[in-house]
Image: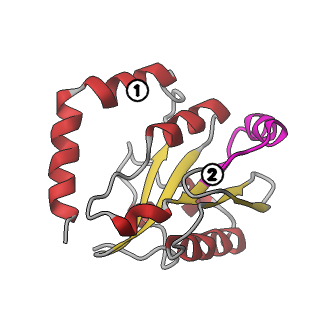
């Protein structure tokens, strides 16, 4: 069963990544509700990208982007690295124009690695519904960013998985 952004965290069912639950499920309840409500709002945006950072201290900051990216200042990036456990979310507003779903982009994953985020999430509004894509930092940290690119661009298995996923999500 899929859940809409804002209902609850789809990854909350546990045991999907070595028994861990999504970092969202571990946030204080008020912060979790606010974060999921923002994701729900972001998923339904048709124009520019919007994003939010859930910080370890319980605060959430929102960021406005342009049509296909969000730029974070150097000082924000340093704060994310120093925090060490931020959860990032953002929308991909252009998915309504396409019948396919790509999920997290290479730049999304690279940025999560760069700032050592605990989790990176992307929300989309697709003709078949709203979806949340997520990747969490493993217990040994993120892989080197070049390994991510090598896997996604050169790996035939990835291409097969992406093609199968793309076929299933088409409407």
Dot 1: few (<14), some (14–19), or many (≥20) neighbours within 10 Å?
some
Q: Which residue does the numbered mark 2 point to in the structure image?
A: 87
Q: Quadrant of residue 133?
A: bottom left
Q: What element carries label 1?
A: helix
Indicate which label's residue lies in the foreground, 2 or 1: 1
The colour scheme applied to this rendered structure is secondary structure
Above or below residue 47? Residue 67 is above
142 left or right, relative to 163: right
Task: Pick the residue in front: 97 or 150.
Answer: 97
127 left or right, relative to 107: left
Above or below residue 149? Residue 47 is below
Q: Which residue does the numbered mark 1 point to in the structure image?
A: 149
- The segment highlighted magenta reads 70-88
Residue positioned 54% across, 75% down in the render: 40
Q: Report x, y in % for residue 73.
A: 79, 42
Task: Pick the residue in front: 51 or 32.
Answer: 51
In the picture, the quarter occupied by the N terminus is bottom left
Above or below residue 130? Residue 143 is above
Residue positioned 51% across, 72% down in the render: 46
């Amino acid at each position: 069963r899929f859940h809409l952004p804002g209902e609850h965290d789809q990854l909350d069912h546990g045991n999907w990544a070595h028994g861990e639950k999504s970092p969202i499920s571990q946030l204080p309840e008020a912060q979790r509700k606010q974060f999921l409500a923002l994701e729900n709002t972001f998923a339904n945006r048709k124009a520019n990208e919007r994003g939010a950072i859930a910080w370890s201290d319980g605060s959430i900051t929102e960021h406005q982007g342009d049509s296909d990216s969000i730029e974070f200042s150097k000082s924000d990036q340093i704060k994310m690295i120093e925090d060490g456990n931020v959860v990032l979310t953002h929308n991909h507003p252009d998915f309504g124009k396409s019948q396919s779903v790509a999920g997290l982009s290479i730049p999304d994953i690279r940025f999560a690695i760069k700032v050592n985020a605990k989790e990176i999430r992307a929300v989309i509004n697709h003709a078949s519904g709203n979806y949340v894509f997520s990747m969490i930092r493993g217990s040994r940290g993120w892989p080197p960013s070049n390994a991510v690119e090598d896997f996604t661009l050169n790996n035939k298995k990835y291409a097969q998985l992406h093609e199968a996923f793309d076929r299933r999500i088409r409407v």
